[in-house]
């Protein structure tokens, strides 16, 4: 069943209208709730109708699911932390959760640390090529698009373009790269993100591969459980499914590949610059940033991977002498040492930072390096243990202290 | 580097091997530079990455981690875990522009008093060349 692909759409007219691309995600969530497959749905909802402010919401009323239909590109939240923190890691409740790739990956990392019980979670993955910071998006809409942010009813990122739809149905589009050159566009971690299709979730849903002009969802089944939900929903007549054409599959692959290429370009730009610096320059670069840290713990509290009940950093909270700058200079470094091997590049730390330290840039750079060294990509499979907790047989036969650095 | 610079080195040594090795160096009256301050831990696997970073921000110019040879760990594989963590730390230090050589991992058995001495001598010289730790006084 895993690996099967479909083009699907909701049968309910209302859901199809409100959904982004045929309403399949909404229909599946509603069905999962109605059929009793799950006790609740976790999805992001606009706060008081504001599409620049998304709140993860726990939904138990099937009708309420419709309020979460559609995509909020400008409300980048990570739901993994909510599941762990406020829903007791789904230990006592069966959930259907809508996941961007970074949400799904963070949940998998937390599951490895026994913080989330994935047996109780159906992850409905949605393709993602990036999100925008709300403040940046609003400014961009005014300055670049010349529209009132409140007028926007929809955003879309496709083929390197940002397309917005206004209340009157008209659309405007701009080249994403050009916007980003000017400091607008997607969050920087999203620009560098390599994972646009969440195959680590139970289902991967998106618009890529859907024939032009048609509002439907391309669904890839990524697990037995995902397949079961899709099958039951189709049998119940909540969604219609059909097999995609060869061209549709190729088209989807092409779009995925192009998104990956674009992310590699951004990686090269961000990391290449750092690599070319001398170690002295690099030190100055990062410590100038670190010196801005006011030790607010925002990054730690936002990080979906951080989970220790007693935090090492906490021990150094306290009073300092007058005239001294509060932070331990190594504050961001210590956090980095604890999560670097498992960072999923969700960018929450950077969003939370009031001092605007480009934390995700550092974290992803180190993580990419560790991926290479330990051959481990975070958040891909719950079977793989985090690289700092496992030892291979081969390693135990090699006495070289610099084994991984040769 | 600076005139009269004496490197300060923190050595985390495991109870069963490297610490005993240092002890052997002592009882054998082997001479080694006094730049090293030894902190005994039960196993190198006990060394949280934070310990190393804290040592650096508290003014250490170099950090030495001394553990049992692979296969000799009293707790089976604590040293192998330490090796992974040290690898991670070296990469991390490199990324923020601190010489990864300031962190050194060595396997020193209880019978290798001589190796302990040689390691410390060599490390002190290496750190002397690198100069003071730029993070000094920041923690």
Image: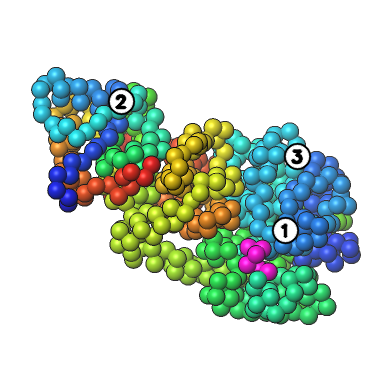
Q: Which residues are magenta?
A: A133-138
Mark 2: secondary structure: strand
Residue B108: give its label.
none
| Protein chain holding label 2 | B
The structure residue drawn at horizontal position 44% and vertical position 39%, both measured from the top left corner, is: A321
Q: Nearer the viewer, mark 1 or mark 3?
A: 1
Q: Is residue A80 left or right of residue A30?
A: left
Residue A285, by quadrant, is: bottom left
Badge 3 marks a residue whose secondary structure is loop
Instruction: Identify whether B38 is placed above or below A29.
Output: above
The answer to whether A313 appears left or right of A63 in the picture is: left
Residue A204 percent coordinates (x, y): 67, 57
Residue contact at pointers 1 and 3, CB within 8 angstroms: no
**Which chain does the numbered disc 3 sit on?**
A
Where residue B121 appears, x then y in whole percent?
15, 37
A370 to A218, vertically: above or below: above
Which mark is on residue A94? 3
Depth check: give the residue in front, A155 or A50.
A50
| Residue under pointer 2 | B40
Cα–Cα span, label 3 and label 2? 47 Å
x, y (%) of residue A258?
55, 71
**Mark 1 or mark 3: whose residue is earlier in sequence:** 1
Gap in angstroms between the C-alphas marked 1 and 2: 51 Å
Q: Residues within 10 Å of mark 1 (few under 14, many from 20)?
A: some
How far apart, in angstroms, are the residues tagged by discs 1 and 3? 26 Å
Using the rendered image, report if marks 1 and 2 lie on a common chain: no
Disc 2 residue crowd, few under 14, some 14–19, many 20+, Cα 10 Å: some
* Residue B83 forms part of the magenta stretch: no
Residue A53: which numbered mark, if any? 1
């Amino acid at each position: 069943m895993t690996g099967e692909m479909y083009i699907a759409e909701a049968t309910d007219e209302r859901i199809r209208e409100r959904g982004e691309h045929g309403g399949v995600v909404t229909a599946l969530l509603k069905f999962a709730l109605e059929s009793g497959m799950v006790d609740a749905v976790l999805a992001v909802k606009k706060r008081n109708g504001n599409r620049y402010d998304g709140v993860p919401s726990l939904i138990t009323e099937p009708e309420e699911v419709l309020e979460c239909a559609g995509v909020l590109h400008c409300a980048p939240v990570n739901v993994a932390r909510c599941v762990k923190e406020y829903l007791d890691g789904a230990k006592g409740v069966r959930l259907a959760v809508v996941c961007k790739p970074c949400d799904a990956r963070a949940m998998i990392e937390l599951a490895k640390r026994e913080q989330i019980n994935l047996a109780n979670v159906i992850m409905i993955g949605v393709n993602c090529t990036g999100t925008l910071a709300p403040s940046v998006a609003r400014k961009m809409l005014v300055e670049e698009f010349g529209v009132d942010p409140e007028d926007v009813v929809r955003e879309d990122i496709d083929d390197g373009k940002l397309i917005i739809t206004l209340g009157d149905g008209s659309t405007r589009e701009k080249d994403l790269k050009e916007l980003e050159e000017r400091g607008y566009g997607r969050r920087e971690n999203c620009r560098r993100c390599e994972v646009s299709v969440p195959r680590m979730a139970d289902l991967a849903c998106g618009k890529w591969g859907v024939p032009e002009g048609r509002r439907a969802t391309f669904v890839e089944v990524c697990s037995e459980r995902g397949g079961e939900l899709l099958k039951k929903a189709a049998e119940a007549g909540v969604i219609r499914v059909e097999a995609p054409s060869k061209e549709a599959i190729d088209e989807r692959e092409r779009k995925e590949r192009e998104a990956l290429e674009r992310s590699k370009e951004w990686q090269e730009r961000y990391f290449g610059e750092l690599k070319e610096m001398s170690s002295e320059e690099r030190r100055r670069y990062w410590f100038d940033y670190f010196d801005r840290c006011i030790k607010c713990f925002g990054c730690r509290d936002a990080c979906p991977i951080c989970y220790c009940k007693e935090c090492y950093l906490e021990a150094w909270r306290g009073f300092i002498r007058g005239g001294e700058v509060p932070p331990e200079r190594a504050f961001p470094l210590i956090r980095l040492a604890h999560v670097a091997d498992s960072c999923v590049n969700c960018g929450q730390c950077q969003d939370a930072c009031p001092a605007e330290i480009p934390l995700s840039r550092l974290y992803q750079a180190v993580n990419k390096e560790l991926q290479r060294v330990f051959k481990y990509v975070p958040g891909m499979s719950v079977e793989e243990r985090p690289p700092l907790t496992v030892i291979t047989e081969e390693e135990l036969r090699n006495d070289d202290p610099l084994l991984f650095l040769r | 580097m600076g005139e009269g610079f004496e490197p300060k080195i923190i050595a985390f040594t495991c109870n069963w091997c490297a610490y005993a090795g240092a002890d052997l160096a002592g009882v054998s009256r082997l001479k080694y530079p006094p730049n090293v301050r030894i902190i005994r831990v039960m196993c190198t696997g006990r060394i949280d990455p934070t310990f190393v970073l804290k040592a650096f921000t508290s003014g250490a110019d170099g950090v030495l981690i001394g553990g049992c040879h692979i296969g000799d760990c009293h707790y089976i594989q604590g040293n192998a875990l330490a090796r992974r963590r040290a690898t991670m730390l070296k990469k991390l230090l490199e990324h923020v522009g601190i010489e990864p050589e300031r962190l050194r991992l060595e396997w020193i058995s209880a019978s290798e008093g001589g190796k302990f001495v040689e390691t410390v001598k060599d490390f002190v010289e290496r750190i002397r060349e690198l100069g003071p730790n730029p993070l000094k006084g920041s923690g």
